[in-house]
Image (tube, rainbow, N blue to C red):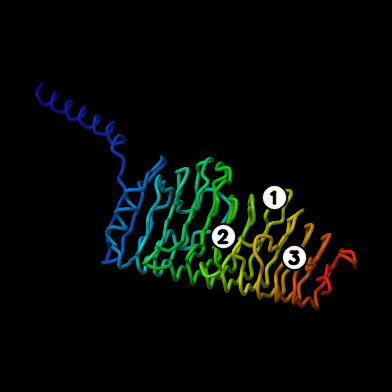
Amino acid sequence: MRSVFVRFSWQILAASILFLVPLFPARAQLTMPNPGAVQIARPAGPGNFDATSLLQEALRRVGLSGGTIELTGPGTYYVNSPIVLDRRTALRIECAVGAPRAAADNQTVNIVYTGQQGSLFTAHAVRSLEIGHCNLAYSNPAYTGDLIDLGGVTGVGDTTEVYIHDNRIGGLSTSGGNANSLIRLEHSNHIEIERNFFTRSATAVLGASDTVIASNLVSIRGNYFAGPFGDVAIRAGGSSWTVAENVFEPKAPNVCGVLDTTAAGVIALSFRGNWIGDGHYGTCIAATRGPIRGGDFTGNDIAGAQVGIALGKSDGVSITGNHFEILKVGVDASSASNVNIVANNFSYIRAGDQVHAPASR
């Protein structure tokens, strides 16, 4: 009789253990495979996982002198307050290597900001920062901040040597697309933005607002700007900007909105080898808030808008070897000076509207 009771008790205990297992899901793992490197893996399975404190702990472990934070577990890592990277040196944030850049909300590794203000990453006075292979997103329809904020600290210095590559960056499909910008550059230099997919914000890349010496040596290359963008894909401000080999499809019904300027304007802008389509209406490239002082537009395909390039009061700009198609005006340089517009191809644009040349002075 006792053996039967014991056996029955073990069966009850085993059943109780099986019932309790789902109440204690696997915890996130934070490991340091070697000094200066931290790996984070979220718990397996569905469900919301708040990774804010875990990312902050990872930063504490790598310290100010730099290291690598790698998110190795697939899934979504929610962040409810800004991750501050200020004053760090040689920091690398890496998600699943080889993760595709695509429009879908759900990628291999998703870092989703849930706040209404602030930034997912704030990086002021940082020297050498790399962010790669992540889905950097925001989910809150009321969010109006700058998703990645690169800037300086008075008395310390600017942020320098930043490489942001192979990411999906933008709002989720339910976000409303109201972010002020996806990458803000203010007092930041030597910035490389390559092979990213940008979607859903007012502006994807926002340059310096008040002075041309506040964001310098900026390279934006090989990206896909899908939109929709409420303002413009790139609002350039600073000096020595290169925008090359990108695809722009803003997908907004009443605006082309590829590139415009901040009030600071741009010194030495090189815009070459870009493809611009599906703009529908509006102006594709403009200098409305500040002038372009020295620059070139070379080898671009610009189609389907009201105006291809409107130079405003820019000076010292060369426009050569471009293809303009299905536009009401190819180039409006009527208010610009010292402009060289030669050897361009114009299709389906009236002869008198291919180039509005500067007025004779």
**Residue that lies at the very extreme toward the front in this rendered image:** 361
Q: Is 96 left, or right, of 307 in this rendering?
A: left
Mark found first going from the N terminus, 1 or 3: 1
The secondary element bearing badge 2 is classed as: strand
The secondary element bearing badge 1 is classed as: loop
Q: Amino acid at mark 3?
A: Ile
Mark 3 crowdedness (10 Å alpha carbons): few <14, some 14-19, many ≥20: many
List x then y, in percent, for residue 156: 36, 67
**Residue that lies at the very extreme toward the left in this rendered image:** 2
Q: Which residue is mark 3?
A: 309
Marks 1 and 2 in Cβ contact (< 8 Å): no
Q: Amino acid at mark 1?
A: Ala
Marks 3 and 2 in Cβ contact (< 8 Å): no
List x then y, in percent, for residue 46: 42, 41
Which label was assigned to residue 296? none
Q: CA distance from mark 1 to mark 2?
A: 17 Å
**Residue that lies at the very extreme toward the right in this rendered image:** 351
Q: Is 353 left, or right, of 2 in this rendering?
A: right
Mark found first going from the N terminus, 1 or 2: 2
Q: Which residue is mark 2?
A: 205
Q: Relative to the observer, which residue lies in front, 294 or 299?
A: 294
Q: Which residue is mark 1?
A: 252
Q: Residue at x 84, y 74 (%)?
A: 360
| Quadrant into which the C terminus falls | bottom right
Query: Vertical placement of 281 versus 241: above or below?
Result: above
Mark 2 crowdedness (10 Å alpha carbons): few <14, some 14-19, many ≥20: many
List x then y, in percent, for residue 298: 71, 75
